[in-house]
Image: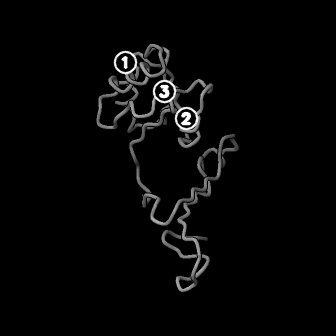
Amino acid sequence: MLYIGEKVGASKDQSGAMKVDIAVDPLEGTNLCASGAGGAITVLAASEHGGLLHAPDCYMEKIIVGPAAKGSVDLDAPVKQNLKSIARRLQRGVDDLVIVVLDRPRHQQLITDIREAGARIRLIADGDLSAGIAAAVSGTGVHA
């Protein structure tokens, strides 16, 4: 088992060794796997040394959109403004947008704000990484 900050591979004194950082989430959707549901995945990310954000286990606010809406959202902006920006970039109405949200008590205000703005919501029990991938890929029917 690897831990945060563990060194593996070539030692520092070997010349020519490429330095990379690797992050592994052995199971995204732990509850999905435990309950026998589909959608659990293993995730690995790699970057140049120092290129990954050190983010210990915590809750983060995230907005994920596809390439067409890149740069149109802001975590500090009101939900309604972000949805209007996404809709404008996708050349559709806010009421045509499908937004995926984890079904958690902490997201109740977000869910209310999305509904009041007129967008549709797809609540999910687990697997926000999979939902983010769906938002980033054209043709999935998920917009954020």
- For marks 3 and 2, the one nearer the N-term is 3
- For marks 1 and 2, the one nearer the N-term is 1
118 vs 27, left or right, is left
Q: Nearer the viewer, residue 40 or 23?
A: 23
Amino acid type, residue under disc 2 in the picture? Ala
Query: Would you place residue 48 above or below residue 66 in this image?
Result: below
Specify few, some or many for label 2: CA neighbours under 10 Å numbering under 14, 14-19, or 20 or more: many
- Please say if the residues under marks 3 and 2 sit with CB atoms less than 8 Å apart: no
Q: Nearer the viewer, residue 70 or 132?
A: 70
Specify few, some or many for label 1: CA neighbours under 10 Å numbering under 14, 14-19, or 20 or more: some
Instruction: Tell us which disc is closer to us: 3 or 2.
Output: 2
Instruction: Tell us which disc is closer to us: 1 or 2.
Output: 2
Amino acid type, residue under disc 3 in the picture? Ile
Cα gap from disc 1 to disc 2, whole angstroms: 21 Å
Residue matched to label 1: 117
> Which quarter of the figure is the N terminus placed in?
bottom right
Q: Estimate the x, y position of residue 143 in percent, counting from the top left.
A: 51, 26
Residue in the picture at 60% in, 28% down: 138
Q: Quadrant of residue 105?
A: top left
Residue matched to label 3: 99
Query: Would you place residue 116 above or below residue 8 in this image?
Result: above
Amino acid type, residue under disc 1 in the picture? Ala
Which residue appears farthest toward the bottom when viewing the image? 13
Name the secondary structure under disc 2.
helix
Name the secondary structure under disc 1.
helix
Q: Estimate the x, y position of residue 117 in percent, counting from the top left.
A: 37, 18
- Please say if the residues under marks 1 and 2 sit with CB atoms less than 8 Å apart: no
Cα gap from disc 3 to disc 2, whole angstroms: 12 Å
Residue matched to label 2: 136
Q: Nearer the viewer, residue 95 or 70?
A: 70
Residue in the picture at 41% in, 54% down: 58
